[in-house]
Amino acid sequence: MARRGQRKDGRYTISAVAEMFDVHPQTLRMYEREGLIEPGRSQGKTRLYSEKDLERLEIILTLTRDMGVNLAGVEVIIDLREKLVLAIERLTEFEDIFRSEAMEDLRDRLRTVGPEKGAMIPLRSAKLVRLNRRAR
């Protein structure tokens, strides 16, 4: 179902977004100048906000209105959030690799490798060594 002010291409004009979120259009322009949002543009250079832009704007407004975070803090939080999402995606990929059959086959082969079977580096269990450092 289309939201009020939504265009046929699924994007929204600045006035529709301002009304939707109860902010002044100048506030949206300021967020753009600060690099917090980057709406697309029409051929006539009209700002057009996508669903992704609206989600990001919702985060910005929650941080500023509800949590009292300033714009510099918002920028840091959003950057860290994006890095965290990327890290989680990569970790999920690694987990998938480690759970794969190919990895299990490799583990099985490594369990039987030793110097007698031509291994270049013999496998040995590691010993934990406690280091005592002297105070200076």
Image: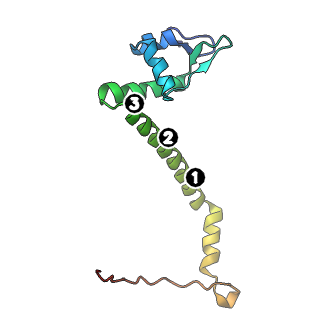
Depth check, mark 2 against mark 1: the one in front is: 2
- The residue pinned by badge 3 equals 71
Ranked by sequence position, the earlier of labels 2 and 1 is 2
The amino acid on which the numbered mark 2 sits, given as a three-letter code, is: Glu
Mark 1 secondary-structure assignment: helix
Expressed as whole percent of the image width and height from the top left, the position of residue 30 reads: 46, 21
Q: Quadrant of the C terminus?
A: bottom left
Residue at horizontal 36 percent and vertical 83 percent from the top? 130
Whether residue 3 is visible to the viewer of this picture, yes or no, is no
Expressed as whole percent of the image width and height from the top left, the position of residue 71 reads: 39, 30
- The residue pinned by badge 1 equals 93
Residue at horizontal 52 percent and vertical 8 percent from the top? 5
Residues 127 and 83: in front is 83
- The residue pinned by badge 2 equals 82
Name the mark on residue 103: none
From the viewer's perspective, tell me whether residue 62 is left or right of residue 47: left
Location of residue 20 by image quarter: top left
**Location of residue 105 with respect to 45 vertically, above or below:** below
**Location of residue 23 with respect to 128 vertically, above or below:** above
The amino acid on which the numbered mark 3 sits, given as a three-letter code, is: Leu
Circles 2 and 1 in contact, beta carbons < 8 Å: no
Depth check, mark 3 against mark 1: the one in front is: 3
Residue at horizontal 58 percent and vertical 52 percent from the top? 93
Ranked by sequence position, the earlier of labels 2 and 3 is 3
